[in-house]
Image (tube, rainbow, N blue to C red):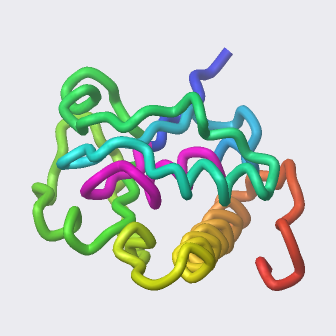
Amino acid sequence: MPTKAKVLFLCTGNSARSQMAEGLLRHYAGDAFEAYSAGLEPKGMNPLTVKVMEEMGVDVSRQRSKHVREYLGYVNFAYLIIVCGDAEEKCPTVFVGVSKRMFWPFDDPARAEGSAEEKLAEFRRVRDQIGAQMREWLRELNVPLHNAPLAQSDL
């Protein structure tokens, strides 16, 4: 049986965007891939990440914030997908064990200011952007989607 392609989502803090992407890949692609996430400076999982993912039926509460050193040199990844500009700037252009490097820039919802509802809205907005990018990428790879988008606005 062939091994599944491994995908690493990387950002700076591994608290929101990369965690969302890891959960969304599992949600939309089922078991077609092995999904991982990590950060250059892990900050711990942001509680709003867990909340907005739960809203769409994706449980990321068991995921944990990890440093990229846990994987690089130990795991061969078919894809390294960097989800923030800061990590893109700080990462070496070539990683041993990575076949394809991609850059999907998203705003950091953890930097949102304002009321609790405004912060939550920013987490939802970024989650939906990541979801749309994920679905488009999976379609390009001809990977069937296992779950429909959360809402029509998520298309």
Res. 84 in view: yes
Name the one closer to the observer, 92 or 12.
12
Residue depicted at 14% across the width and 57% down the height: 91
Q: Is residue 19 magenta?
A: yes
Find residue 82 and report its horizontal and vertical position in percent: 34, 61
Res. 129 in view: no
Q: Which quarter of the figure has residue 3?
A: top right
Find residue 78 and report its horizontal and vertical position in percent: 43, 42
Q: Which residue extends farthest front?
A: 115
Q: Which quarter of the figure has residue 141?
A: bottom right
Name the one closer to the observer, 132 or 150.
150
Name the one closer to the observer, 52 or 75.
52
Q: Quadrant of the C terminus?
A: bottom right
Find residue 112 and report its horizontal and vertical position in percent: 41, 78
Q: Quadrant of the N terminus?
A: top right
Q: Is residue 108 magenta?
A: no
Left or right of residue 1, residue 116 in this image:
left
The magenta region covers 8-24
Residue depicted at 19% across the width and 26% down the height: 73
Left or right of residue 147, residue 4 in this image:
left
Find residue 36 and report its horizontal and vertical position in percent: 46, 37
Left or right of residue 44, residue 29 in this image:
right
Residue depicted at 55% across the width and 55% down the height: 49
